Image (cartoon, rainbow, N blue to C red):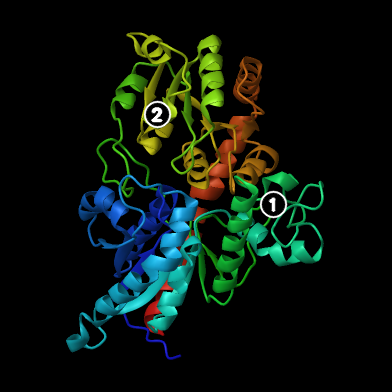
Amino acid sequence: MKYFMRAGGKVILVPYPAQGHVTPMLKLACELVSHGLEPVLVVPEFIHRSISAQIDSMEGIVCQSIPADGLDEGKPRDFFAMEMAMEKIMPLHLEKLVRQLDGEQEQDHDEGRVSCMIVDLLASYAINVARRCGVKVAGFWPAMVATYRLISAIPDMLLSGIISETGCPLLETPICVSPGQPSIGAAELPWLIGTSAGRTSRFKFWTRTMDRSKTLEWLLVNSFAEECHGGQINVQNIIPIRPTSNTMHSRTSTKTVASFWKEDLSCLDWLDKQAVASVVYISFGSWVSPIGEAKVKNLAVALETSGRHFLWVLGPAWREGLPRGFVERMSKEGGQGKIVSWAPQMEVLQHEAVGCYLTHCGWNSTVEAIQCKKRLLCYPVAGDQFLNCAYIVKAWRIGVRLQGFAQRDLAEGLKRVMEDIEMDGRIVGLNEKLMGKEATSRAATNLASFVNNIVSM
């Protein structure tokens, strides 16, 4: 098939339809603007309704929607509904949009036409769309390179008898795909979520994703070159681009994040009244129901018993497990804690009152914590979070893993993470590898080289 590469022009970005995937893709879009490109972020209609007004304030970025029948208001938007929409509904609409965008400036020859599509690998349906439209396509991996290597090792794990043809572990031994890197338990593989049928479906999703992406010429990775403990990333088509700048957020700065939910800014005023490093910030991310009602209750009881101040991001739908009267006791004037439905996370993590972060170890949250030099209490829930946790605790040693939310578990975890006098030094060192001048320059060079490739071919 003939591919058309145009100087300058539009770059279509297709993220997987979830907050943790749209966020890094939008940050990439902001960087592409500075390189003279016209990024077009394509999302399903239900996401477009939430973020389009926010993106309108970001100069140079266009947000376009495509229908995703089955993901309407009032219907479940779980992994399986998303997969169905991406495989059955969205390809046709995306192809129509790509052809429309590519033909808009036909009278001006090449100017303004589509130069490239950048596709989140978890939205791999869009790779086939790009190829049908004759447009060059690059992959985007929103997580660690280590996670990509783990998923890529599925054929080897099958051949070695580590997993079955449906992805089920056949051995109880720890799994490590790169020598010298942290291992994870056999039950912690990214697709082992939910029921047996659900796990099989997720495994098929990953094998299909890797099959579609194996011939990509470029894979932009939302990570930094030295993520792998003591080593560099030496895979030809992998391009680490995190961070391309070291910009930090403030209450008045222009944001490069579009939130699906309204952020409760009152938590920043509450933090202003707390002592330095006295607050435990708690958030389990945006994608899956975090820990279940029983664990919510246990954590609430453990927090109240600890006497420590806390800021807890907990959506209304997940508050059923809270003890009776807990919110009222905690939120009264001079109370111990504050609970919000959604928070401006970077501003929270930058705040001097936050002493540590109890996290699910999602990759975006992990990177933001490193940027803000915060210690981590880790409670991975699903997907790549277990491998991220292994790096946090075993390789980088900037956090402690919790085994549960009993009062003793939380008390011991907080004691270990807050009393490790050498942890601050390790966090500063890792922050330099992520945010330092050399790291930022390398990431910027990587992105500039990629841009040069797509506009010059």
Residue, far left = 107
User: Would residue 62 appear left or right of 422 to someone viewing this image?
Assistant: left
Task: Please state which of residues 90 and 218 is positioned toward the viewer in this rendering.
Answer: 90
Residue 95, quarter of the rendered image: bottom left
| Residue at mark 2 | 351
Residue, far bottom = 2
| Residue at mark 1 | 230
User: Would residue 292 appear left or right of 200 to someone viewing this image?
Assistant: left
Mark 2, secondary structure of its residue = loop
Mark 1, secondary structure of its residue = loop
**Image quarter in which the C terminus is found:** bottom left
Residue 134, quarter of the rendered image: bottom left
Residue 191 appears in view: no
Q: Amino acid at mark 2?
A: His
Q: Position of residue 19 (x, y in %)?
A: 40, 48
Question: Which residue shows up at 72% across the image and 62% down it?
Answer: 165
Task: Please state which of residues 106 and 6 is positioned toward the viewer in this rendering.
Answer: 106
Which of marks 2 and 1 precedes in the sequence? 1
Vertical relation: 109 (above or below) 267: below
Vertical relation: 44 (above or below) 417: below
Q: Position of residue 327 (x, y in %)?
A: 39, 15
**Tags 1 and 2 touching, CB below 8 Å:** no
Residue 67, quarter of the rendered image: bottom left
Q: Position of residue 90 (x, y in %)?
A: 37, 66
Vertical relation: 288 (above or below) 422: below
Q: Amino acid at mark 1?
A: Gly
Question: Which residue shows up at 20% across the image and 54% down it?
Answer: 56
Residue 193 appears in view: yes
Question: Which residue shows up at 43% across the image and 33% down it?
Answer: 349
Mark 1 and mark 2: Cα distance apart in space: 30 Å
